[in-house]
Amino acid sequence: MERGAETGVGRTRRLAELVDLIARHARPDQTTRIDGVLASAETRVGEPTPSRSGTVMALIAQGAKRIALGDRTYEYRQGQYLVASVDLPITGHYVEASAETPALGFGLVIRPAVVATLLLEERPSQRPAVSALGVADASEAMIDAAVRMLTLIERPADREVLAPMIEREILWYLLNGPMGPAMRQIAMTDSGLTQISRAVRWITDNYDQPLRVQELAGMCGMSVSSFHRNFLAVTAFSPLQFQKQVRLQQSRLLLLSGAGDVATTGFRVGYDSASQFSREYRRHFGLPPGRDAARLRAQTDS
C-alpha cells in the first residue's frame, strides 16, 4: 500500500475513534471535564441561529455545519476545522445531522497566552489584519491529538500533566496550518487582528452606547481609514454594522427572557426609535420582535 493510502486509512480510523469519544462524552452545554475542551452532539439540522463564535478551534468529526458572518459563508464538514480568532456575532446551523447520524464536534478554546508561548522564537511585528474566521482540512496528526485529548476525560490521573501538552500540540498544528497567520496575530499585541479585537470587545461591552469611530480608531492606534479597512477585513462588518449585530442579538435574549416589552428592550440596547428597532429586528430575524420572542419561547417549552 502506498504511503498516501496509508495516511488516508489512518486519518479515517482516527476520525472513527473521535466520533466514538464525542458521542460518549458530549453534554448539552458542550463542556467536558477538561477546561477549555468542548464536545458537541446535535441530532437535527435546525434553522440558522444567531450566536457568538467565541475564540475557538472547532473540528467536525461527523456531519456538517454552516456559519455566516456578514456576507461571508463558511461550511465545514467531517475532517475539517474552523478557527475563530475573534469573538464575533455569527449565524450558524448544522446542515447534516439526524438522530441516527448526529453531527459531532470537538472544540478547543484558544488562549492567547498559550499561543504566545509557542511564538517566543518569533519577533512580533506589525502585520495587516486577516479574517477572524477560516476553514481548513485537519491533518491526521491533529485528529490524533484530539482523540488523545478526549481519552484523558476517562484518565483523571493523567489529565493535569498531559492535557496542557496536547493543547500546545493542537495549537502548534494550527499555527503551522492554513490558519497560521490568524493564529500568530492572536498572540501579538501590536498585530492588526489584536488591535481590532480591542475595538470588538469595546463595542460588545458597550453596545448600548453611541459609537464614535474616531475614538475607537485612536484606541487601536490607527487612522480612521485604516481602522475601517482592518475592521472590515477581520469581522466582515463596518463598525456600525457590527454594533447593530450585537444590539439585535442582545435584544433577542432580553425579549426571550421576558425582561421588558418591545419598546423598552429597544431603548435598553441603544435604539432611540422603537419603530427603527422593530424594523431592523424584523429585517434581521424575519419576524417582528414580539412574534419572534413568542415563537422562541414556544419552541423552548415544547
Image (spheres, helix red, strand yellow):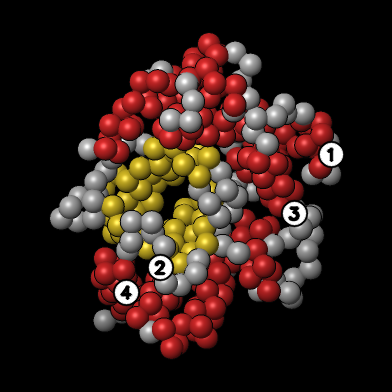
| Tag 2 residue | 32
Amino acid type assigned to the residue bearing label 3 in the image: Ser
Residue 102 versus residue 249 in the image, above or below: below
Category of crowding for the residue at label 4, using alpha-carbon neighbours closer than 10 angstroms: few (below 14), some (14–19), many (at least 20): many
The structure residue drawn at horizontal position 24% and vertical position 46%, both measured from the top left corner, is: 44
Q: Residue 141 is drawn in which quadrant? A: bottom left
40 or 194: nearer the viewer: 40
* Front-most of residues 23 and 175: 23
- Cα–Cα gap, marks 1 and 2: 40 Å
Per the model, the C-alpha gap separating discs 2 and 3 is 32 Å
Q: Earlier in the sequence, mark 3 or mark 4?
A: 4
Quadrant in the rendering for residue 244: top right
Q: Are marks 3 and 1 in contact (CB under 8 Å)?
A: no
- Which mark is in front, 4 or 1? 1
Residue furthest out toward the top = 275
Name the N-terminal-most of marks 3 and 1: 3
Q: Which residue is mark 4?
A: 14
Residue with the mark numbered 1? 218
Disc nearer the start of the sequence (4/1): 4
**Which residue corresponds to the image point at 42% horizontal and 76% vertical from the top-left?**
149
On the rendered image, what quadrant is the N terminus found in?
Answer: bottom left
Q: Give how far across and how far down residue 283 sits, in percent.
A: 45, 19
Name the residue carrying label 3: 191
